[in-house]
Image: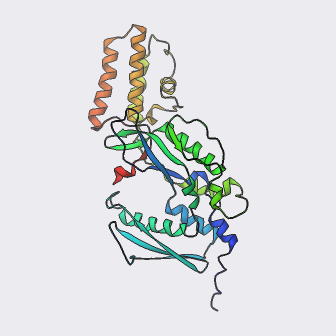
Amino acid sequence: MSPGPDPALSSEVVHRLRQPFAPGVLRWKIQTRVNEQQADPYATVVVYVDARTVAAHLDDVVPGRWSTVYAAPPVTVGLPALECRLTVCGVTRSDVGTVEPGSRAGSDTKDLYSDALKRAAVQYGVGAFLYRFPQVQARVERSGQTWYVTREAQAELRVLTRAVLAGEGPLPRFQALRVRDYQPGAVSGVTAPGSLGSAHGSVTDPALARSQEPEEGPPPIGEERGLKMEEQLRLALRGGEWEGDQARDFATFVLGFQVSALSDLTELEARTVYRAAKASLARTGQTPPAITEDITEDITEEKTRHGREDQPSGKMRSDAERG
């Protein structure tokens, strides 16, 4: 017995396809190169979703009723390109994905297929809400030749994401973001008439957000160096107002976010805490040269060992640097 025809691509299906995703599956990436001459550098960042999220959304809305065919596009100019013909409920629409050559070692082909799928899905309204996000610049820091969004900016991007999806306005005052052209309720404007539903209208399984790979970022200093740092801080803070307190409490005070373990700090964060400890010693007037020397040597030693410049506290790497 042959299978019957696919149910029509009804207005109800289109409405569900156009729904915004859960905030947890949205990601931000640096889009432009950074002006290194800026004392307080910012970079343009854009919101995006990965191809797994798009495929999961299609599975949620039209399970078993969508398929893809990939082919070389009839015309290509410049960058490598791949056409994705996406069929949903018997209706086929297509678009072309591109990728910057050598953006990440060994990933060009995968990125090409992913970009093609995401662009074809937009033809059905999947992810169309992303184009209603405001223009955003975020504070960034550099690790070697790579730029990252700072921790503070990442936290504010999460706040911004939820506010935009909820249609809230006005936005809170951000310290590490610059936001332009924000329109409350603009995201809901790309959906078909009707309620956005719960969780800002997402029909994507929230478990997918928990399964996403962590944002790329500089490695923490690790347990061995964390223990060494704790001993250094204990000696450095002796005789001052922080004597007797946990080293991680001092680090929390200096960095402005909760530090659960010194081993979780990045290179730059650890160095920032060391320098604050040295300043604290200077204020007490009881700066034993050996302790100051130890702290300085520890910083120099780690910088030499790893052969790189200051590590940032952010986690998102620049797309421009990937290229």
Q: Is residue 22 left or right of residue 272?
A: right
Which of 187 and 257 lies nearest the eye of the viewer?
Answer: 187
Q: Position of residue 210 (x, y in %)?
A: 57, 52
Q: Position of residue 244 (x, y in %)?
A: 51, 16
Q: Quadrant of the C terminus?
A: bottom left
Residue 3 lies in quadrant = bottom right
Point 65% across, 56% down: residue: 188
Q: Quadrant of the N terminus?
A: bottom right
Point 64% across, 68% down: residue: 61
Residue 190 lies in quadrant = bottom right
Which of 316 and 258 lies nearest the eye of the viewer?
Answer: 316
- The mark total stands at 0
Q: Is residue 31 left or right of residue 307?
A: right
Which residue is the extreme one toward the bottom? 1
Residue 28 drawn above or below residue 294: below
Q: Position of residue 94 (x, y in %)?
A: 49, 74
Q: Is residue 76 left or right of residue 14?
A: left
Which residue is the extreme one toward the front? 181
Residue 299 lies in quadrant = top left
**According to the image, what is the colour scheme of the structure?**
rainbow
Residue 11 drawn above or below residue 50: below
Q: Position of residue 259 (x, y in %)?
A: 51, 31
Point 42% across, 51% down: residue: 31
Which of 134 and 120 lies nearest the eye of the viewer?
Answer: 134
Q: Is residue 296 left or right of residue 261?
A: left
